[in-house]
Amino acid sequence: MKRMLLLVMLSFMAQMFSATYTVDGYAFLEGETDHSGIEVFFQRVVPDTLYSYTIHTDSTGYYSSNIEGGWYDVEYSKSGHYPVITEDVALYLDQTLGDKTLSVIPTGLYGSISGVLEQGVYNVISTITVEAGDSLIIEPGVMLNFVSTANFDVYGYLKAEGTKIDSIYFNPINDTWGGLGFGYTSSVTIKNCSINSAQRAIELSGITNASISNIDINLSDYGIYVHSYVNCKLKKIKISGNSSRGVYISNYYNTIEISDSEIVGYAFGIDCVHLNNLKLYNVLIQSSDRGINAPDINCIIVNSCIIGFGFYGIFGNELFEIKSSNVYGFDHNYYDCNPYIGVNVTTNENGDPCDAYGNISMDPRFVDAANGDFRLQSDSPCIDAGTNTIAGYVFPVADLAGNYRIWDGNGNGSTIVDLGPYEYGAPSGIEGDPVTIQDCQLFQNYPNPFNPVTTISYALPKAAQVELNIFNMNGQLVQSLVNGRQEKGIHKAEFNAGDLTSGLYIYNLKADGKVVQSRKMMLLK
């Protein structure tokens, strides 16, 4: 009897494994209408690997076949696309598998790179490297789009200087990418660039002289990441993102100067460990934990505004030099600093209570901090609350928004700088003199990238019939901002892209029917 049962069981198992079942489903090619030619490969892994099947989709993406029962690994593939693999699929009955979509593998740059990268759009499909002894010049108007696994490592010479007309963009193709890394080279110059959604937007190690200016860093885990032996000046930097650290300075022997910049939305605005030298002039920091965490470094903070809703505004030490600044909104505005800092004993030029060093702790009264507008309202205590004299520092012509840097914002007759990177009530400087306008000019929108509102400025040397239009990358008109006669001078127009999708857009200025200029801007949502 036992022998009979065993024979019956073996016979049943043999029939089960030798039986065939119908399997079908759909597989699609991203962005295509013809989905034919996708190879669907079935490889049995249990109870043995004797069987494999190859099927191809028709134009609708449909495939169907009869296969032997078992557990299978299924791979969907086609040249030029990323394969999709599904493991351990049990096929012991007729069934329809779930839909699969194959993403396009972008063609583009990878490996060692040198020479000149001319204006255009490039996909980076694997890490690119400027090797020691090599040099790379990235021209204005270049857009580099990185896959998630790609970095940009520089050990030689890199010059990436965009212009106000054409910035240089470093973007992810999907959600994120590695970032720009510079290691043990003598000189780094980055100007007028935009870096988006990187793990470490700019990483520096062993840099003798780094000059980084007019950079927008958005939605990156770390905005600036500094290791050892770095001498760096950061000017007019905007770092924004709800993530870890705006600026992280680790290890020793770093001298970092940050001026006229904005660091917003990070748990730690600036996190500095071990012995380093840090100087902050006209900087705005907003954080959810600590504005500045630097318990064992040398730090000078002047004309800055540090606000938030976390534990510590400044976690420092008694050697910190803090003057003419505003620290507000934290559980502890100052921790372990000079015991006289933050203790109101007098008043400043505006009559507001301050400590012996001119520091206040008051609501800065921003225009719309919740939506990223950190310009000052007319009743802000930060107006004319700074100092015009900082040893070793020269004020720029214009603030972070392109307005004159030092101005009598409260109209009391004293021309004193405001706290933070923005000057209230000042006329538009655009890094130059707005009074002398020789030609029609279209300036880079601010902020850029933006979400969803940005401001476009332009200059007219004489009265003209003006058209200011926004187009998508297909040349279709998205919105007409200005259509009418305007007098000579500097003009501004606000563009709200709340109903549009993320991407690159073109704005175009015409005066008296003639095209003056076109520029690109990036909407990131």
Image: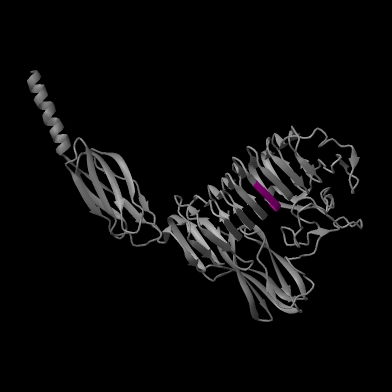
Front residue of this view, candidates 300 and 290: 300
The residue under the point 15% across, 31% down is 13
Q: Extreme top residue here? A: 1
The residue under the point 73% across, 35% down is 317
Where, by quadrant of the figure, is residue 497 drawn? bottom right
Q: Quadrant of the N terminus?
A: top left
Find the magenta span and give its range: 255-261
Image location (x, y in percent) of residue 225: 58, 46
Position of 435 relative to 216 (above/below): below
How many numbered circles does the render carry? 0
426 lies left or right of 75: right
200 lies left or right of 404: left
368 lies left or right of 449: right
465 lies left or right of 1: right
Image location (x, y in percent) of residue 308: 71, 41
Residue 277 is covered by the magenta coloring: no
Image location (x, y in percent) of residue 87: 31, 41
| Residue 308 visible in rendering | yes
Front residue of this view, candidates 202 and 513: 202
Position of 278 relative to 438 (above/below): above
Q: Main secondary structure of the magenta part?
A: strand
The residue under the point 70% across, 70% down is 458
Front residue of this view, candidates 457 and 306: 306
Image location (x, y in percent) of residue 343: 84, 35
Where, by quadrant of the figure, is residue 399 drawn? bottom right
Where, by quadrant of the figure, is residue 320 drawn? top right
| Residue 450 visible in rendering | no
Q: How is the image coloured?
A: one colour
Front residue of this view, candidates 451 and 384: 384
Residue 257 is covered by the magenta coloring: yes
The residue under the point 16% across, 41% down is 50
